[in-house]
């Protein structure tokens, strides 16, 4: 049993508190990780807010980590002590119906227990003085040490800086993967990206890599436009500058609509705009944002009858164990930048400040350094 520091979310809507917690050793098929760095994603804030129908407390949040294997449980063969890894909230067992389908990255081998905040055997490795604390998204990276299933780690190049490539554990991979795997954007396409946080900006990078001809970046916070342009956005649109729906503005700008749009906010009204700004006959809109309990999307069925497609994506359709190491290698080869996302770094003690910066629209990613 290890005692270490972790940020605990005791209840919805309350700040995290830094606590000494106990972490039990990894059981068979599990791995103990020493966290080096973790990003703070909007999904952590979403669950902390109480809007997540799967949100459970008390819990150790965090799912965008870079870590080193500290110990392995019985039967673990694919990673060894000292390996550098990225924990995966979308694991890859390679054996379930989903993994074998060739159609999705949504491995379901441990999804049921993961959604209950537990390890695959139905128990938690986290406690404080005998009181159980829950896991989050199977990763719980807001802790100096965490335990994850072997199928939920991607072994990566040891030369990669964990304080940067941790962002490939969620946001950057999600945005880039949504463009590459889910939409499969072709060269010359016109693309609209709604929401210019970590996910939306990564989608812009993905669109540039896909050789999109025009990339329209949309946000209600104009402070995001400079970085969007720097990454390759050709147009920026602030919906607040117009007295008509933003989808009309974009349809006019693009001679009938975009080929692909991406919703990177989690706002069901914007999801509708993102669909309706797509070109008649072929436009595809990809939902990336996560919306709160009870929220539903709507549009006129005519929008789909007339050839638009509505899709969604989790972790950018990326299979973590087989494909994420390649993202790390491409970063190391200089194919894309991660520094641009890291607007703030801080220690675990200041983690609530990371949430404040996100809510104030002042950060892209805060990275917590352990
Ligand atoms: P973020 O808070 O960093 O960025 C959101 C951006 O949206 C901000 O720039 C904000 O100004 C902008 N915005 C807010 N309301 C808007 C509106 N009405 N119109 C236009 N812009 C608006 O968030 P993030 O970390 O980039 O995450 C974005 C979303 O993606 C969240 O919902 C998150 O939960 C979700 N997410 C989903 C996946 C997945 O696998 N599907 C992965 C990661 C994150
Ligand atoms: N618990 C939420 C769902 C949240 C959600 O959709 N999460 C994404 C990843 S967001 C990362 O920042 C995901 O992976 N979804 C697939 C899955 O199986 O959860 C709810 O609404 O219940
Ligand atoms: Zn995330
Ligand atoms: Zn599987």
Image: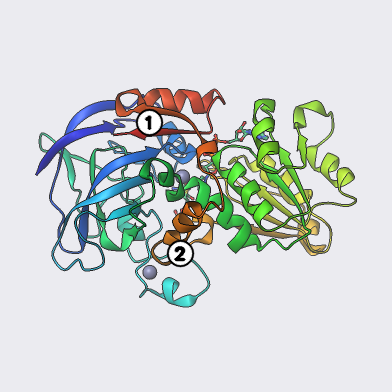
Give residue 323's mark. Answer: 2
User: Crowding near pointer 1: few (<14 within 10 Å), some, many (20+)?
Assistant: some
x then y, percent, for residue 44:
42, 38
Q: Mark 1: which secondary structure?
A: loop
x then y, percent, for residue 271:
67, 46
Using residue 78 as the reference point, say whether residue 263 is left or right of it.
right
Residue in the picture at 52% in, 28% down: 363
Q: In this view, does 52 lie above or below 11?
A: below
Residue in the picture at 89% in, 44% down: 252
Viewer-nearest residue: 95 or 32:
32
Q: Split into 4 quadrants, where in the image is the C terminus?
A: top left
Residue in the picture at 20% in, 64% down: 29
Q: Which of marks 1 and 2 is in front?
A: 2
Tag 2 or tag 1, which sits nearer the N-term?
1
Give residue 12's mark. Answer: 1
Q: Quadrant of residue 53?
A: top left
Q: Is residue 107 above or below residue 293?
A: below
Give residue 72's mark. Answer: none
x then y, percent, for residue 87:
34, 52
Q: Mark 2: which secondary structure?
A: helix
Q: In which quarter of the image is residue 283?
A: bottom right
């Amino acid at each position: 049993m290890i005692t270490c520091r972790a940020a605990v979310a005791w209840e919805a809507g309350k700040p995290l508190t830094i606590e000494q917690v106990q972490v039990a050793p990894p059981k068979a098929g599990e791995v103990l990780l020493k966290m080096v760095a973790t990003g703070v994603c909007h999904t952590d804030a979403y669950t902390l807010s109480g809007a997540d129908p799967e949100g459970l407390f008390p819990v150790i949040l965090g799912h965008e980590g870079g870590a080193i294997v500290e110990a392995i449980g019985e039967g673990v063969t694919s990673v060894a002590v000292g390996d550098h890894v990225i924990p995966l909230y979308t694991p890859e067992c390679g054996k379930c119906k989903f993994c074998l389908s060739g159609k999705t990255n949504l491995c379901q081998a441990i999804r049921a227990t993961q959604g209950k905040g537990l390890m695959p055997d139905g128990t938690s490795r986290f406690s404080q003085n005998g009181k159980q604390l829950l896991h989050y998204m199977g990763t719980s990276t807001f802790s100096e040490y965490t335990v994850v299933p072997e199928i939920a780690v991607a072994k990566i190049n040891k030369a990669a800086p964990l304080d940067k490539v941790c962002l490939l554990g969620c946001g950057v991979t999600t945005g880039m993967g949504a463009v590459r795997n889910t939409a499969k954007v072709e060269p010359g396409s016109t693309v609209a990206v709604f929401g210019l946080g970590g996910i939306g900006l990564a989608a812009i990078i993905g669109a540039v890599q896909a050789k999109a001809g025009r990339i329209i970046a949309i946000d209600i916070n104009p402070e995001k436009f400079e970085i969007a342009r720097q990454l390759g956005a050709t147009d920026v649109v602030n919906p607040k500058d117009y007295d008509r729906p933003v989808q009309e503005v974009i349809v006019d700008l693009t001679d009938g609509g975009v080929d692909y749009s991406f919703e990177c906010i989690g706002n069901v009204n914007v999801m509708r705009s993102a669909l309706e700004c797509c070109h008649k006959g072929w436009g595809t809109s990809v939902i990336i944002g996560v919306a709160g309990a009870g929220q539903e999307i709507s549009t006129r069925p005519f929008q789909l009858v007339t050839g638009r497609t509505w899709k969604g994506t989790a972790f950018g359709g990326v299979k973590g164990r087989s494909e994420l190491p390649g993202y790390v290698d491409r970063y190391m080869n200089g194919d894309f930048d991660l520094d641009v996302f890291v607007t703030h770094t801080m220690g675990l003690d200041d983690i609530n400040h990371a949430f404040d910066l996100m809510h104030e629209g002042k950060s892209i990613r805060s990275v917590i350094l352990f």
